[in-house]
């Protein structure tokens, strides 16, 4: 099936692009730490300067600590589903784009990035007969390079790796999670109405994604990928050793919280109480 193609609503894309960039800057723990360090270094009052430096050090310890991060994310992430618990066949799996793939112009080939597990899990689900079709959803999400549509690139990759074109449905209009739900719901109504479907996205993103799809009257079963949390483990390394990557994970988590709040205000999402954590096959 040929992807849906359009230039989209540029004004809405621009609004969300700039808002997300502003939010990412001001809600980043690294920003808070750097600001406090600067205040501590340049404040003339020694007492206040010391307080700022201590505050920045405390924030650095908190946001780089693995145990604190894991326990907080455990309350937010939708858990991954063990393979043996998928006992039924689903009509399709909906794969949400977002940092999965781009095109490297220097070598003229696709380059895969952080969220590739979403696509890999969808391929596994398809090849093992757990889903019959794959629905790809994701546009450019940028103000520039509007022709770099993620779903179209993923579709091309799947076809080249042997998945029949007839088994791939594609929405390349979406620039954000709200539009993922909006445009994919049209495909579902036309081809999969009343059939069981999986929603495939990262565990961190799943709660917001489910809320958007359920706002569009779609009841999907979550299939979380690239989860940050897993079996609870408490070791000295998690308690004592700071990790720089935890600050990035905190930023991603705060971005999800802010995005969820913004979508609620805009009327794009249901309340969190309506987002259940049912697993595939249960």
Image (spheres, rainbow, N blue to C red):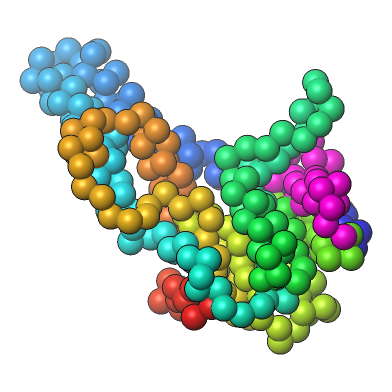
Residue 52 visible, this orientation:
no
Numbered disc total: 0
Residue at image point 53% right, 55% down: 225
Q: Residue furthest left?
A: 47
Residue at image point 43% right, 63% down: 79
Residue at image point 63% right, 71% down: 198
Q: Position of residue 33 (x, y in %)?
A: 30, 28
Q: Position of residue 164 (x, y in %)?
A: 87, 60
Boundaries of the magenta span: 139-164
Residue 194 visible, this orientation:
yes
Question: Viewer-proximal residue, 270 or 151?
Answer: 151
Q: Residue 125 is drawn in which quadrant? A: bottom right
Q: Residue furthest bottom?
A: 194
Q: Residue 131 is drawn in which quadrant? A: bottom right
Residue at image point 48% right, 39% down: 24
Q: Is residue 73 left or right of residue 93?
A: left
Quadrant where the image shows the N terminus: bottom right
Q: Is residue 69 above or below residue 201?
A: above
**Does the segment drawn in magenta span residue 46?**
no
Q: Is residue 271 left or right of residue 123?
A: left
Q: Is residue 248 above or below residue 252?
A: above
Q: Position of residue 256 (x, y in %)?
A: 47, 53
């Amino acid at each position: 099936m040929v992807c849906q193609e359009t230039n989209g609503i540029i004004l809405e894309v621009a609004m969300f692009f700039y808002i997300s960039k502003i939010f990412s800057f001001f809600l980043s723990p690294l920003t808070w730490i750097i600001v406090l360090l600067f205040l501590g270094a340049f404040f003339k009052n020694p007492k206040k300067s010391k307080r700022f430096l201590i505050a920045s050090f405390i924030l650095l310890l908190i946001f780089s600590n693995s145990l604190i991060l894991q326990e907080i994310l455990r309350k937010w992430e939708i858990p991954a589903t063990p393979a043996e618990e998928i006992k039924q066949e689903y009509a399709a799996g909906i794969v949400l784009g977002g940092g999965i793939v781009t095109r490297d112009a220097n070598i003229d080939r696709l380059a895969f990035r952080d969220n590739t597990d979403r696509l890999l899990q969808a391929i596994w689900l398809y090849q093992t007969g757990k889903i019959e079709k794959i629905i790809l959803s994701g546009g450019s999400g940028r103000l520039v390079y509007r022709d770099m549509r993620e779903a179209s690139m993923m579709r091309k990759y799947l076809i080249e790796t042997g998945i029949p074109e007839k088994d791939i449905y594609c929405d390349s209009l979406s620039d954000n999670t709200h539009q993922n739900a909006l445009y994919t719901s049209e495909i579902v109504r036309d081809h999969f109405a009343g059939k069981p479907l999986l929603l495939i996205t990262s565990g961190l993103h799943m709660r917001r994604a489910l809320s958007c799809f359920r706002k569009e009257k779609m009841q999907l079963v979550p299939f979380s990928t690239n989860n940050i949390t897993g079996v609870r483990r408490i070791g000295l390394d998690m308690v004592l050793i700071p990790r720089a990557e935890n600050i990035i994970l905190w930023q991603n988590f705060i971005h999800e919280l802010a995005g969820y709040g913004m979508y609620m205000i805009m009327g794009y999402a249901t309340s969190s109480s309506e987002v259940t954590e049912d697993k595939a096959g249960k």
